[in-house]
Image (cartoon, rainbow, N blue to C red):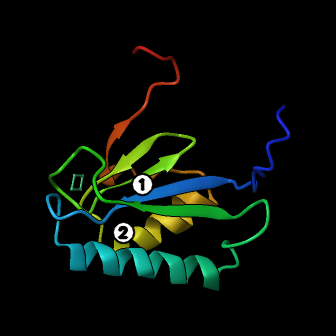
Amino acid sequence: MSSSGAKFQPYRKHVIMCVGESCSSPEVSGSLYEALKERLKALGLHQGPERIHRSKSSCLGVCQGGPVAVVYPEGVWYQGLDRDKIERVIQEHLIQNQPVAECVFHQLSEKPGE
Ligand code: FES
């Protein structure tokens, strides 16, 4: 490994939420992103190696049916999120590793190319 000075901070999962303007209202998705941030903090999932890393994107390439978010490492894509649904994603997927099937519109294959 290189000793370039960059340091990886480990985390358990990564949620990337679109806050762009084509898939939903940026006010709605921005508010949802803030709610996610607050809930993760309240649950103690915002720090340490078991934390849930979160990022926002200006576009995830879907551009409809938002708010849209993707959870890695599973590559599970969610659409039509609201506060109730994001709470279910937190409780069922991020904590219990069970994706919320009724909000999933795509999942990456475990076999690349499929
Ligand atoms: S603007 Fe949200 S996916 Fe493109």
Q: Alpha carbon of mark 1 to alpha carbon of mark 2: how far?
A: 8 Å
Is residue 83 shown to the viewer in this render? no
Which of the image's four quarters has the N terminus? top right
Q: Compared to 84, does 91 lie above or below? A: above
Q: Is residue 91 left or right of residue 9?
A: left
Q: Where is residue 86 shown, x and y percent of the image?
A: 41, 69
Indicate yes or no: mark 2 CB to ligand 1 under 8 Å.
no
Give the quarter of the image for residue 34: bottom left
User: Foreground residue, 31 or 58?
Assistant: 58
Quadrant holding the C terminus: top left
Q: Which residue is mark 1?
A: 100
The residue located at (54%, 51%) in the rendering is 98
Residue at 30% from the left image edge and 59% from the top image edge: 58
Seen from this angle, which residue lies furthest top?
A: 113
For mark 1, give the secondary structure: loop
Asked which secondary structure carries label 2, the reply is helix
Report the image quarter containing ligand 1. bottom left
The residue carrying mark 2 is: 85
Is residue 49 rendered to the left or right of residue 98?
Answer: right
Q: Nearer the viewer, residue 5 or 13?
A: 5
Mark 1 touches mark 2? (CB < 8 Å): yes
**Residue at the location (42% across, 14% down)?**
113
Residue appearing at x 48%, y 62% in the figure: 55
